[in-house]
Amino acid sequence: MTKQVKRIYLSSPHMSGKEQQFVDDAFQSNWIAPLGPHVDAFEKEIANYVKCAGAVAMCSGTAAIHLSLKLLGVGKGDTVFCSTLTFVASANPILYQDADPVFIDSEPLSWNMSPAALKKALIHAKSMGNLPKAVIVVNLYGQNADMDSLLAICNEYNVPVIEDAAESLGANYRHKASGTLGKFGIYSFNGNKMITTSGGGILVSDDLDALEKARFWATQARDPARHYEHSEMGYNYRLSNILAAIGRAQLQVLDERVTARRAVFERYDSELGHLDGIQFIPEASYGRCTRWLTALTIDPTKVGVSASQVIDELALYNIEARPVWKPMHLQPLFKQYPYFIHGDSSISDVLFKNGICLPSGSNLTQEDQSFVIDCFKRAIGSDK
Ligand SMILES: *Cc1c(COP(=O)(O)O)cnc(C)c1O
C-alpha cells in the first residue's frame, strides 16, 4: 500500500451548496452584524426542528453552556455536576462562574453519564449539605444519555439538568429531540459538528423568559434606554447574521447528514465489528444516534496492539483518527475535583485508554471508507 497524499479528516465541514445564496442575501441587505433577520429565522427554524418553545443563537456552544449555568444561578462556590467523558468545553463554563465541578463516570451501554454514579454523587452531596445547582449531561458522539433515568434521579433532588447536545443535533430520545429533555439544551455549530456555521452555538428551552434573559446577557446586557445604560454585567455572545445564514442552509440538510454519518458507522461496523477484541460504541434502544463520530474500543489483550498504536499506524497513511475524549477527571486542569465512578472501577478510564474515533464525516467517500478499513485491518494485523 502506498502512502496516500490526500488527508482523510476525522470530521470536516460539509457544505450543501446553498449556503452561498443565504450569505449573498445577507450581503445584499448589508446585514453584516452580530444580529439580523437570518439570526431570527435560524433561531425559529432550530426551535421548530427540535420542537422547543425558543432558541437563542450564540457565537459558540460554550457560550450557550455558560449562559445556561448563569440562568440557573450558578455562582461562586456552587457545585455543578458534569459528565467526565467529554470535551473540555462542557466543563470550562463551570469555572467561568467560579463554581466547582464534580465529575460523573460513564455507563458502558451508551458511554454517557452513569445513573448509578450520579446517584452516588447526589447522595454524597446531600449528606454534605452541598447539592449541585445544575447537572450537565453530555450526549457523547451523537448518542443521547439515558435521560429518563438521569432526570428521575435529578428530580428526586430537585436539581435542574443542562443537556450538552453539541454532538447530537438530529438524534432523538424516545421520540423527543436530543437536547430538549433538560431545562436547557445547547447545540454547537463548530466546523466539525453535525452541521456548521464555521463557529456558533445555540441555547434552546421551553422557558421563554429565561431565553429572553440569556439574549439580554449575550448582547452586552443593554438596559432598555436610548443611551447605553447597564445595570448588569453582559457578554458579547451573539451569532453574526452571516454565520446564521450559513446555518439556515445547513439545517435544511441536517437529516441527510445524520443518514450519511450513520451509513459510515454501519460500514465500519459491518467490516470490522466482527473482529475479536473490537467493540463499536453500542446504540441504546431508547433512541437514534447521529453517529457524529464512529467510536470503538480495542482490547489490546485480544488484538495484540493498543488503540494508540493503531492511531499512530493510521497517521502513517494520512488518516486522522483520534483517541476518545480524555476524561475531565484525568485532566491537570481539574485534578483537584471529585469524581464518582459507575461501579467498582472507572468506566471512562477504560474507554479513554482503549477508545478510538475513526474518520466519520458525512462527506467521506466510499473509497475513503474502504481505505480506512484496509489500513485499520493492516494496523491490527488482520489483513493477512
Ligand atoms: C464541540 C463541543 C462543545 C463546544 O462547542 P463550541 O461551539 O465549539 O463552543 C461542547 N461540548 C461538546 C461535547 C462538544 O463536542
Image (tube, rainbow, N blue to C red):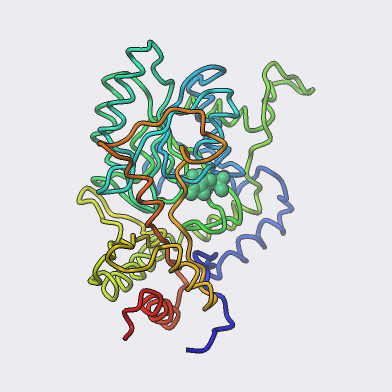
Residue beneath the point at 59% across and 46% down: 39
Q: Is residue 330 above or below residue 123?
A: below
Residue 48 in the figure: left or right of residue 342: right
Residue 376 visible at all: yes
List x then y, in percent, for residue 353.
40, 53
Residue 278 in the figure: left or right of residue 367: left
Residue lying furthest right: 227
Residue 43 visible at all: no
Residue lying furthest left: 285
List x then y, in percent, for residue 303.
31, 68
Residue sitting nearer the eye, 285 or 83: 83
Q: Quadrant of residue 95?
A: top right
Residue beneath the point at 69% across and 25% down: 222
Q: Quadrant of residue 302?
A: bottom left
List x then y, in percent, for residue 216.
61, 28
Quarter containing the C terminus = bottom left
Residue sitting nearer the eye, 57 or 119: 119
Residue lying furthest bottom: 1
Q: Is residue 112 above or below residue 339?
A: below
Q: Across the whole image, how many numbered discs are drawn on residues?
A: 0
Residue sitting nearer the eye, 66 or 371: 371
List x then y, in percent, for residue 85.
41, 44
Residue beneath the point at 57% across and 17% down: 76
Residue 292 in the figure: left or right of residue 76: left
